[in-house]
Amino acid sequence: MKPMKRIAAGILALMVICTAALLPQPVSAVTQADIDALKGDASDLTSQKKELEAKLSSLSDDKAQVLKKKEVLDQQIAVQVKEISNVESQISTYADLITQTQAELVDAQEREAAQYDLFCHRVRAMEEDGTVSYWSVLFKSDSFTDLLDRLDAVNEIMDADQAVIDQLKALQDEISEKEASLQTSKSEAEAAKADLVSKKSALEQQRKQANQMIAQLAANEEETEAAIDGMEEEEERIRNEIQELSRKLAAQQAANGQSSHSNPGGYIWPVDSRYITSTVGGRASPGGVGSTNHKGTDIGRVGYTSPIYASKAGTVIVSQYSRSYGNYVAISHGNGNTTLYGHMSSRKVEVGQYVNQGDVIGITGSTGNSTGPHLHFEVVENGVRVNPLSDGAAPKMGYLSGYTLSSSA
């Protein structure tokens, strides 16, 4: 009977060891390498920001340098936004890593409990067999760690028993490592959250500084007039370039056997707001530095995170930065029909990309010649700039309606 018990105990040990080794391990969806990669990107962004800070410091306080300084500030703000996005990604990745590590820790603890239960069965089997007296070792131990130390000194342990003990030690080390890793991840996640608050506060201050910088131009009438003339010249040059690019696109499409006719249907609102702060035509110069012969429609009551939609389907022919329009996108809709979207905080499309009506092409902002977040929207039809707003007295089919005019519009 005793040999049978010994054989059964040995088989039990072998089965549990094999089972523990074959247990499915959690698939690592997130690793520390993912965090390290994000930190590497953050370091690159920090370097970019320092370069821009140095560039900004090198510019004098001369009014003639204001537009150049605004351009550098816009670049700096763009880097700051990327830094915030990076930290938010770090926080999200830390959250995933913490959840994953917690699950792995529970799994390791369950495997440790199963392995310890196996060890107790082995001890009882050997005691009943009378081969080795383990009970004195087991009950004289002050702790599980002490038990492992005592068992190390027992030379009569069979190979199977030693394998069980080795597995227990490995699991204990694994648990300690995961507990330490979990604590580190939690601490670094909290530090990232504090860093995020700081970066968002800095971003808000940078945006205020950038908007105030444009308003400062109004302090000197002569310099203000020079700045306005320069910006209007740039805007006109950009509009001519857009029309030329639109013509080239139409010629290219015709050569490829594609239709270049203006796509049917009207326009949709390029943002969710319906509040008009400036219309096409004559107006008072906003902030003392805006054109008095406005070429587009300004839509207000947007922030720095509102999506901008393609008002009509077409091909992106411009996606870049200028000192007047800031980050802007121009879309060709065929037959000299184009739309322009200015002062974006960021652009989401590239030149040559086809967009459907309603696709997000950028995010609202206050880049370029702007004193606050809004969308500057221009529509050109058959090469002629038009007012995209539907007149209440004689509504224009397919144009924008249902809007509210500000008192200064």
Image: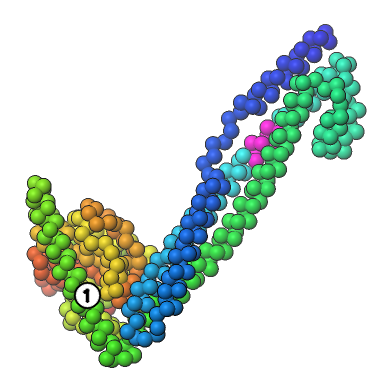
Magenta stretch holds residue 386: no
Which residue extends farthest front? 58
Residue 393 vs 351, above or below: the answer is below
Q: Is residue 87 depicted above or below 392 in this figure?
A: above
Q: Residues within 10 Å of mark 1 (few under 14, many from 20)?
A: some
Three-letter code for the amino acid on which mark 1 is drawn: Glu
* Residue range of the region highlighted in magenta in the rendering: 105-113
Along the horizontal axis of the image, is 259 left or right of 142?
left
SS for dot 1: helix
Q: Is residue 311 left or right of residue 23?
A: left
Vertical relation: 77 (above or below) 96: below
- Res 275 seen here: no
Instruction: Specify the principal SS of the magenta part.
Output: helix
Q: Residue at x 53, y 68 (%)?
A: 198
Residue 107 inside the magenta-drawn segment? yes
Q: Position of residue 245 (x, y in %)?
A: 15, 61
Horizontally, is 246 left or right of 225 in the view?
Answer: left
Left or right placement of residue 128 versus residue 322 in this view: right
| Residue depicted at 14% across the width and 65% down the height | 243
For the point 8% across and 46% down, the residue is 257
Residue 140: percent from the left, percent from the top? 90, 33
Numbered label tally: 1
Note whether residue 191 is visible: yes
In which image quadrant can residue 233 be found? bottom left
Query: Which residue carries the number 1 mark?
Result: 234
- Residue 227, image x, y percentages: 27, 83
Give percent across and percent down for residue 202. 49, 71
